[in-house]
Image (cartoon, rainbow, N blue to C red):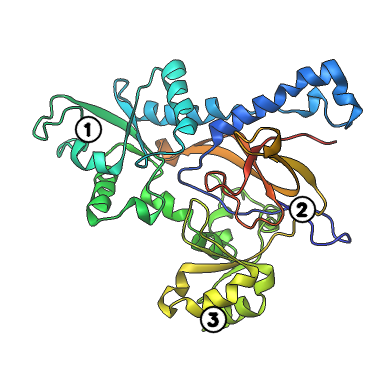
Amino acid sequence: MIHAPSSDEPASLKQVEFNTISSSFGTLSQRTSELHQLARYLQKSTGFYNSSPFLKSSNLPTNDTISGLSRGLAAAHSAYGSPEARILFVVQHGERNVFDQRWLEYELLEKHSIHVIRQTFDELATSAFVEPQTRTLRIRLSDDLLSQESSIEISTVYFRAGYTPTDYPTPAHYDTRYLLESSRAIQCPSIQLQLAGGKKVQEVLTQPGVLERFLSNTNRYGDKVYSDEDLQSLRDTWMEMWGLDRDQGEGLRRAREEASTLVLKPQREGGGNNVYKEAIPAFLDSLPEGERAAWIAMRLIATPKEVGNYLVRAGGGVEGAVKSEVISELGIFGWALFGGGDNEVKEEEVGWLVRTKGKDQNEGGVAAGFSVLDSIVLVD
C-alpha cells in the first residue's frame, strides 16, 4: 500500500503482509482488469469526454494471472513425473470462491492437459490413502473403502482450504492433513511453508539481524548475493511491528499507549481477524495472558487522503455504485517450486491483484465483503 504520513514526507510503498496459502482472487483479478480494458474501446470512440488525461489505452496494463498461476501448478505436476496423475484441489465445504478456482482448473486442462479433482477434508477422510511402499497419494473414486483399484494418483495438492481453524473442527481433520503431507505428492503449500507465512514470522523478520540470516548468503563463487543496500531497501518496505509478549510486558504496554496508530494481528488468514485502533485497549483487557504470544502489533499504514472512486456492488444497478474516498492495496502473485537438483528453486512473478475499499473501512477482504476487486491505471 502507499504510505503517505504527511505532505512533508515522500510517499513510499509499504508491505501489508505476505501470504503462502490460498492466495485467492488471482483469476477474478484478471477478469476484472479485462473488464476495465473494455474501456480501450470507449477511450478510442469517445476519449472519455476528456475526463482524465490518464484514461488511455497505453495506461491500462494486461494481467495474465490465470496462465501464470497455472504454469506454477503445471511445473509441480511435471516435476512429480507422472503425466497421468491429477492435481488435487482441497476446498472448503460449500465453497463460495469456486469461480476463482475453476478458471485455474480449466486452464490446466486446456493448456496443460492436466486433470483436476476437487475434494473437501471430509471427503478426503474416506477417499485418500497413501501407498506404504511408494508413499504415492491416491484418491478412491468409489464408495468402497476397501477398493484401491478404482483410484487415481495425485501429483500435487493445492490447498484452497486449511488456513483457518474452522477447517479442522475435529482431530480427524488434522489427521487428514497429516496424511496428505506424509505422501510424496508436492504440497502447495507444505505445512512448513504455510507456517512461514504466519504473522509471527513476519514480525520476527523485522528484528535486527534476522533478515541477514536469509539474504546475506553468497553464491557458488563466493560473491555476496545481496548488498547492504538491498537489505535496507527491503527493510524500508516494512512497517514497525512487535509481539505483545515482547520484553516482559513492554510490547503490551506500547500497544495500549499507541493504540490509535496500530492494528493487532493474530496468526490467521482469510480476513475479519484483526483489531484496529480504538478497539485495541478493550480487546487487550479481555485477552488471556496465555494468548498474547499469538498476536503482533503493527503500525498502521497512513494512506493518501482525498482519493475518490466509485465502489460497485454486484446486482446493485446504478444505485449500487457509491462514490467514496478510497484506499487501494496492490498484491503481487508468484509461485516457487523448491527441491530440484542442487536445491534449485524455480520461481516466477505472474500477475497482480488490486483491492479497493472505503477509507473508513478497516478490514480489506473481498470475500468477507469489505472491499472490491479493482485494476491499475499507470501514471507517468
Residue pointed to by mark 3: 247
- Residue 123 left/right relative to 282: left
Quarter of the image that includes the C terminus: top right
Q: Quadrant of residue 113?
A: top left
Which tag, 3 or 2, sits closer to the chain's start?
2
Mark 2–mark 1 Cα distance, whole angstroms, equals 48 Å
Q: Earlier in the sequence, mark 2 or mark 1?
A: 2
Q: Amino acid at mark 1?
A: Arg
Q: Position of residue 334 (x, y in %)?
A: 55, 38
Up/down of 253 relative to 264, above or below:
below
Q: SS for tag 2?
A: strand
Query: Residue at 16% across / 24% down in the picture?
Result: 150
Q: Identify the image quadrant of residue 209.
A: bottom right
Does label 1 or label 3 sit earlier along the sequence? 1
Q: Report the disc number at residue 138.
A: 1
Q: Residues within 10 Å of mark 3 (few under 14, many from 20)?
A: few
Q: How far from the left and from the top, in percent, is residue 18?
A: 55, 50
**In the image shown, does 229 or 100 lie closer to the viewer?**
100
Q: In the rendered structure, which amino acid carries the disc numbered 3? A: Asp
Which residue corresponds to mark 2? 12
Residue 278 sits above or below residue 358 on the image = below
Residue 62 in sight here = no
Q: Any mark on residue 155, and which?
A: none
Q: Residue at x 40, y 36 (%)?
A: 341
The image quarter containing residue 75 is top left
- Residue 162 x, y percent position in the rendering: 37, 48
Q: Amino acid at mark 2?
A: Ser
Q: Residue 90, percent across and down? A: 35, 38
Is residue 318 shown left or right of residue 256? right
